[in-house]
Amino acid sequence: MKSIKISDAEWQVMVRLWQRSPQPAADLVGALQSTAGWRPRTIRTLLDRLVRKGAVKVHEDEIRQYAPAVSREICLRNESRSFAERVFAGEPAPMLLHLIKETKLTPAEIEQLKQLLAEKEK
């Protein structure tokens, strides 16, 4: 699948759609107006951009509704790769080590990391 570049503002729209979809534009506008403080026209422009990029699809039933065309996991993978390329010269290990050092982890998260590392060793 081709990588879709999503801006910070577009990411906020996608989060709303991943939480609940399909949604009419009016619901998205109302939610994002109150949380992000954006004007309705801005939100509709972001939706149009996401549709053109292939990140969002439109359902034409009784009312026009929007839904994600890509999963959150795919977008996270793309964003992670982009971040690793820009900041860590594409090297995942330094990125992971930095994140682990700088992040407060719960015992459950530490255990999950141990399990992932054990699987990688196999």
Image: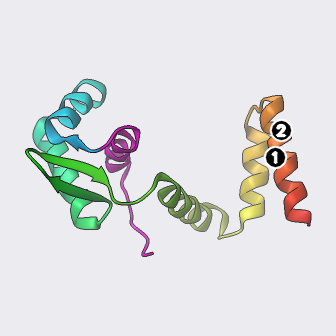
Q: Quadrant of the C terminus?
A: bottom right
Q: Is residue 32 above or below residue 4?
A: above
Q: Residue 84 in the image: state x and y as whole percent.
A: 62, 63
Callout 2–callout 1 Cβ contact below 8 Å:
yes
Q: Residue 48 in the image: state x and y as whole percent.
A: 17, 56
In the rendered structure, which amino acid carries the disc numbered 1? Leu
Q: In which quarter of the image is the N terminus?
A: bottom left
Quadrant of residue 23 within the rendered picture? top left
Residue reaching furthest to the top: 34
Q: Residues within 10 Å of mark 1 (few under 14, many from 20)?
A: some
Give the number of the disc on residue 121: none
The answer for how far apart the CA atoms under marks 2 and 1 are is 5 Å
Q: Residue at x 40, y 60 (%)?
A: 70
At mark 2, the secondary structure is helix
Q: Residue at x 25, y 24 (%)?
A: 34
At mark 1, the secondary structure is helix
Q: Is residue 37 above or below residue 19?
A: above
| Total numbered circles | 2
Asked if residue 20 lies in the magenta stretch, the reply is yes
Q: Residue 27 in the image: state x and y as whole percent.
A: 20, 33
Q: Which residue is drawn at 56% across and 61% down?
A: 77
Does 10 sit left or right of 37 as displayed? right
Residue reaching furthest to the bottom: 2
Q: Is residue 36 above or below residue 1?
A: above
Residue reaching furthest to the left: 62
Q: Residue at x 25, y 58 (%)?
A: 57
| Residue pointed to by mark 2 | 110
Quadrant of residue 33 within the rendered picture? top left
Give the number of the disc on residue 113: 1
Q: What stretch is highlighted in magenta?
A: 1-21
Q: Which of 89 and 43 is in front in this view?
A: 43
In the rendered structure, which amino acid carries the disc numbered 2? Ile
